[in-house]
């Protein structure tokens, strides 16, 4: 790993923990309670709250705010201007900081540009949320989600290509790039060694 890179315009509050090899770009603000792993990239104008955990090798593109109670596991990709929320029913005149809901994004998931993840949801490992989608319920591992509200239209491999299997039923698929095997059973997709 290389040393930490922090642009001169970034603000890193005292107490923030940032792993080696991470890159913090222009006008980023990381609050003091944030925990950021190794090899993370935070693009221009990213905000990271106090009660945030970002795993190793995550990439957060420009103009994303990662609010309190969001956990990103290893290898999560957040596209430009995507949105996390932390209060389900906000009102300017009603204080609801004690009502923050936890949002968890599992290993390897992709959140496309301009999508919205409503607080209190869990995005499964290697799921793929398309650009502009609005996620308001939990997402299965490997699920491909699009639309408003987001609906599952398929499956994605760990490599990031659509898997030609139905949404339900049974089936199997081998990735032509990685040779990983996937099995669909009980309406869930699993990666397996067969």
Image (tube, rainbow, N blue to C red):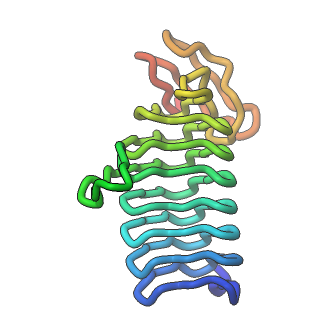
Q: Nearer the viewer, residue 2 or 193?
A: 2
Q: Position of residue 16 (x, y in %)?
A: 44, 82
Relative to residue 5, is residue 100 drawn left or right?
Answer: left
Q: Nearer the viewer, residue 183 or 118?
A: 118
Give the quadrant of the N terminus.
bottom right
On screen, residue 146 above or below 75: above
On screen, residue 138 above or below 72: above
Please identify the quarter of the rendering in which residue 126 is found.
top right
Q: Position of residue 119 (x, y in %)?
A: 40, 46
Q: Position of residue 18 (x, y in %)?
A: 51, 79
On screen, residue 106 above or below 74: above
Kindly identify the residue that appears in the image at 36 percent across and 44 percent down: 88
On screen, residue 157 above or below 153: below
Q: Position of residue 42 (x, y in %)?
A: 63, 69
Kindly identify the residue that appears in the image at 62 percent across and 41 percent down: 158
Kindly identify the residue that appears in the image at 66 percent across and 25 percent down: 163
Q: How many marks?
A: 0
* Residue that extends furthest to the right in the rendered view of this protein: 177
Relative to residue 183, is residue 173 drawn left or right?
Answer: right
Q: Nearer the viewer, residue 133 or 4?
A: 133
Kindly identify the residue that appears in the image at 57 percent across and 54 percent down: 76
């Amino acid at each position: 790993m290389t040393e930490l890179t922090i642009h001169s315009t970034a603000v890193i509050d005292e107490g923030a923990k940032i792993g080696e090899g991470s890159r913090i770009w222009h006008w980023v603000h990381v609050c003091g309670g944030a925990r950021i792993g190794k090899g993370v990239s935070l693009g221009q104008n990213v905000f990271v709250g106090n009660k945030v955990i970002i795993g190793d090798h995550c990439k957060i593109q420009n103009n994303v705010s990662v609010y309190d109670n969001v956990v990103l596991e290893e290898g999560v990709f957040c596209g430009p201007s995507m949105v996390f929320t932390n209060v389900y029913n906000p009102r300017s005149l009603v204080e609801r900081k004690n009502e923050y809901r936890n949002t968890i994004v599992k290993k390897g998931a992709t959140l496309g540009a301009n999508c919205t993840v409503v607080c209190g949801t869990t995005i499964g490992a290697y799921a793929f949320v398309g650009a502009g989608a609005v996620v308001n319920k939990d997402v299965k591992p490997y699920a491909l989600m699009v639309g408003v509200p987001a609906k599952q239209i398929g499956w994605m491999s760990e490599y990031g290509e659509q898997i030609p299997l139905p949404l339900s039923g049974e089936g199997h698929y081998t990735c032509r790039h990685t040779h990983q095997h996937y099995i669909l059973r009980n309406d869930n997709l699993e990666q397996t060694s067969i």
